[in-house]
Image (tube, rainbow, N blue to C red):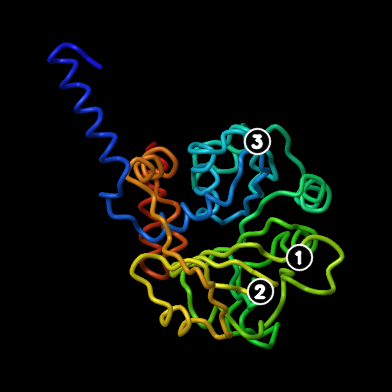
Amino acid sequence: MPRTRRGVLFFAMATLIKDLEAGTELECAIDEIICFCLARQIHDGDVVALGLATPLGAVAALFARKMHAPEIYIASAIATSITLDPPELSLTDAEGRWIEAALNTSGFVTGAADYLPAVKPREFFRPGQVDQHGNTNNIAIGKNYRRPRLRMPGVGGIPDVSVFMSQMSLYVPRHSRMVFRKKLDFISGLGHSEGRNAGSGPQYLVSDLGQFDFAGGNMRLTHLHPGVNIDRVVAKTEFELAIADDLQTTALPNDRQLRILRREIDPLGLRKLEMLTGRARRAALRAIIEQDVQS
């Protein structure tokens, strides 16, 4: 224990700061809740694979590396690279930074077809549609492939890697019946299927309403985010949703974790882009690019 008055005061202040940081006084946004939930799926020593346009997954991986999993490898579809020391997030210079930080780079086909099957990574996908068995669609919405109602960004390497992976996690920024479907318009990612020769379907999903697992190959609600009730989740899910007997409330990051996420991991706010659409997203993109260029 400190013996001087100054030492006593310093000790009291340090204790107060520690106590304050243990709780959540800062308001936690839903994008931060999703990042926090995804980060907790990552374990030290994992190889974490990231897509081309998945900032929530990227922020989650960098946050996990900072907080509890310092020895993870990160394989990024950006520059098809793998690294132990990932660069700071950027919109304007992402490829250059990932190449500079890479232990190895390769062509996209080689990475998806050769490297990833060998290392069996943990990967985060954002589905445009998902059914109760974890099959996903990132191709198009609408039955006519050539004239769909909505053409989605595409599948990348999902059809290749989802057939052998066992550590897939999904995230959905906006939970709705348009996303959680009884029957998918197309299937681009394989879920829990009896016809599998390897791997399994997704093990975990988080949306802006709650957290889910796939017990017995069927999606099951395990956690509600604070302020969300079961009726709301059920109403926004087209298929019949299983609910865990011990349904819990999602734990929130504390103030220290939020400050690290906001100030050190993602000061540009790239994670928020996946929560926005239309005019709000365009405005956020302009602001982020301007800040990115100046930093």
Q: Relative to residue 149, is residue 187 drawn left or right?
A: right
Spatial separation of the CA atoms under disc 2 and disc 1: 10 Å
Q: For the image shown, how many numbered marks are present on the structure?
A: 3
Q: Is residue 144 above or below residue 91?
A: below
Q: Is residue 147 above or below residue 113?
A: below
* Most distant residue in the left direction: 5
Choose the circle earlier in sequence order: 2 or 3: 3
Q: Secondary structure at mark 1?
A: helix
Q: Is residue 275 above or below residue 99?
A: below
Q: Which residue is mark 2?
A: 137
Q: Relative to residue 294, is residue 47 drawn left or right?
A: right
Residue 273: image quadrant is bottom left
In front here: 80 or 124? 124
User: Which labelled disc corresponds to residue 35?
Assistant: none
Three-letter residue code for mark 1: Pro
**Image coordinates for residue 237, horizontal then vertical, percent:** 52, 82
Three-letter residue code for mark 3: Thr
**Image coordinates for residue 245, horizontal then vertical, percent:** 52, 73
**Image coordinates for residue 164, horizontal then vertical, percent:** 80, 59
Seen at 14% across and 15% down, the residue is 6
Q: Which residue is mark 3?
A: 83
Image quarter in which the C terminus is found: top left
**Image coordinates for residue 161, horizontal then vertical, percent:** 76, 58
In front here: 197 or 123? 197
Choose the circle earlier in sequence order: 2 or 1: 2
In front here: 203 or 59? 203
* Residue contact at pointers 1 and 3, CB within 8 angstroms: no
Mark 3 neighbour class, 10 Å CA radius: few under 14, some 14 to 19, many 20 or more = many
Q: Relative to residue 278, is residue 65 drawn left or right?
A: right
Q: Which residue is mark 1?
A: 159
Seen at 70% across and 83% down, the residue is 146
